[in-house]
Image: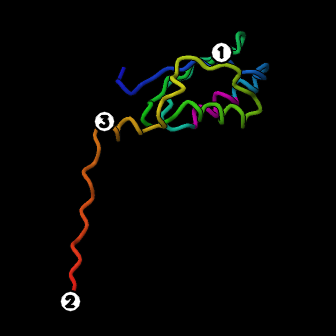
Amino acid sequence: MQASMQTVELEIGGMDSDRACRGVRSALNCIRGVARIAMEPHTRGVTVTYDAFKVAPRQFETAVRVMGCEVEHMTGCDSRALPAGMALVQKSPLPPARRPALHEE
């Protein structure tokens, strides 16, 4: 597994039918950066493996909410984590931009 791959476990309220399960799975699969989804409908649990440089866990909450369900509990992610991609920028900052010299005439 690559260094940027992370796993988060969600407990989802309102996922009490096959239709709701399919909707939640479909919504999560539409998010760029999601690599794998494992669902346990009997426990309302969903495990999502994702690329942390492409997606932030808060996007999972939004996708679940759009399907009429609610994330009641989320584990496995750092709530203090930077937005997706920010860690990459901080580890390899770009050099300052060069500005052209102003010529006075």
Quadrant hosting residue 16: top right
Q: Which mark is residue 22?
A: none
Outermost residue toward the front in this view: 104
Give the residue at x 38% y 27%. 4
**Mark number for residue 91?**
3
- Quote the CA–CA distance across marks 2 and 3: 42 Å
> Which region of the structure is painted magenta?
23-30
The residue nearer to you, when weighing 2 against 78, is: 78
Please tell me whether residue 63 belongs to the stretch shown in magenta. no
Image position, residue 6 (x, y; %):
45, 23
In percent of width and height, residue 71 lies at 69, 25
Number of the front mark, 1 or 3? 3
Question: Is disc 2 placed on a helix, strand or loop?
Answer: loop
Task: Give the quadrant of the N terminus.
Answer: top left
Query: What type is the residue that disc 2 sits on?
Result: Glu
Q: Nearer the viewer, residue 37 or 83?
A: 83
Disc 2: which residue: 105
Image x and y of residue 8, in percent: 54, 20
**Disc nearer the start of the sequence (1/2):** 1
Q: Position of residue 103 (x, y in %)?
A: 21, 81
Measure the alpha-carbon separation of dots 1 and 2: 70 Å
Label for residue 45?
1
Which of marks 3 and 1 precedes in the sequence? 1
Mark 3 burial class by Cα count in 10 Å: few <14, some 14-19, many 20+: few
Determine the residue positioned at 42% across, 35% down.
Answer: 53
* Looking at the image, residue 70 lies above or below residue 38: below
Q: Amino acid at mark 1?
A: Gly
